Image (cartoon, grey):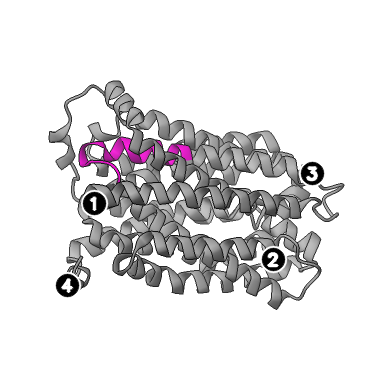
Amino acid sequence: MSKNQVKIPFTNYQKIVILILSLTQFSVVLDFMVMSPLGDLLIKDLSISPSQFGAVVSSYAISAGVSGFLTASFADKFDRKKLLAFFYAGFIIGTFLCGLSSSFYFLIFARVITGIFGGVMSSISLAIVADLFDIHHRGRVMGFLQMGFGISQILGIPISLYMANVWNWQAPFYLIVGFACIILCAIVFIMKPIDEHLSLQRDNPLKHLWKTLSNRHYRIGFLATAFMSLGGYLMMPWGSTYAVNNIGINQSDLPLMFMVVGLCVFAIMPIIGILSDRFNKYTIFLAASIIMVVAVLIYSQLPKVSLMVLILVNVFMMMGIMSRMVPSQALTASLPEQKDRGAFMSINSSLQQLAGGVAAMIGGLIVTQKSSIEPLERFDILGYVVVGVIVTNIFLTYRVYKIIKQRNE
């Protein structure tokens, strides 16, 4: 790869598409990520246990996984723009239902609906990226898309927590619905059809799905993505409860913590994207994984510390987590052929969500809490499990890297 390839600027339309996809990612990520900081309020308000809260988180992830798997059978049979608009509209409806929730069971129902539609958004977005951008520029695009995570923490989560403290924990979901409606209009009226892949389709949907699943190289990519998801979801749902009940941080300090962490992630994501395009993607992934292992071991065994120390540890850990995702997704998106991208990305997203749902349930079984105001117990054990998952993911991602390298030689 030459340096000139990296420096080719995006067209104006490509920039608009990146913005739209980044904002859709922002809203979907915020809808999921806000559950963790709202966790302590939600557990206390609904009088539920950690395992029940794990069920709330996993209900979204598992329904998203099932939806993604079913979508994989026909994802390459439609204009990707139409798929994006359809599933985003369903996501908006599900999020609105979350805002109406006032009981544990209705919230589970609402999260299932949201997961069915929202869980497919990432795979559709990644397929669009793979169609519109070559491999030498995907790292940068992935970096911009992942900035939605940072923005959700800089603005979305602090504002959501403030609204939850002033009104109730349901209020942030109404905020997401209003924002998402604007983005849906942009998808419908600004984006052009994305249908070049349709001319490459010859198999019926089920046969196409089976062919994608039976590809040995694709299966290695699926496993790498599943373990990537396991490593993140095992600890993520318990962030606010751990900070408040174990570390002793005030609930009112959580917005500041998430904002600072988000600012740091927002700053580093474009840099990681550029580095992933300029240097070996696996090397970047490996370095980030080592950082994450160290951060998890420190974070999961913290004594009572100041807010500043907790923020620094969280920044360190989240930089490791997000710096793994950019090169990993860029590598995985390069595995399928163009005619298989929609199916591959849907299956990949499905396994990612299913693995996340399983991880949330496992996390809920590992950690315990005597009451909603008591510290979480066995959180250190959860940290060791996460480290084991990360090490396995390093090996699987190396195999993905070798496959791509051999194919390009």
| Picture quadrant where residue 72 is located | top left
The magenta span reads 334-351
Return the mark for residue 4: 4
Q: What element does badge 3 sit on?
A: loop
Q: Nearer the viewer, residue 74 or 319?
A: 319
Q: Earlier in the sequence, mark 3 or mark 1?
A: 3
Q: Which residue is mark 3?
A: 47
Q: Which mark is residue 298?
A: 2
Q: Can residue 51 be seen in the rendering of this structure?
A: yes
| Label whose residue precedes the other's in the sequence (2 or 4) | 4
Mark sitting earlier along the chain (3/4):
4
Mark 3: few/some/many CA within 10 Å (<14, 14-19, 20+) = some
Tell me which label, 3 or 2, sits earlier in the chain: 3
Q: Name the amino acid type tagged 3.
A: Ser
Q: CA distance from mark 1 to mark 4?
A: 34 Å
Residue that label 1 marks: 189
Cβ atoms at labels 2 and 4 below 8 Å apart? no
Q: Report, in whole angstroms, how far the alpha carbon at label 2 lies from the one at label 4.
A: 41 Å
- x%, y% of residue 281? 36, 61
Disc 1 secondary structure class: helix
Looking at numbered disc 2 in the image, what kind of residue is underneath it? Ile
Q: Residue at x 48, y 49 (%)?
A: 395
- Give amino acid for label 1: Phe
Residue 103 sits above or below residue 152 on the image:
above
Callout in the foreground (1, 4): 4
Residue found at x 69% / y 59%? 240
Q: Is residue 332 left or right of residue 392?
A: left
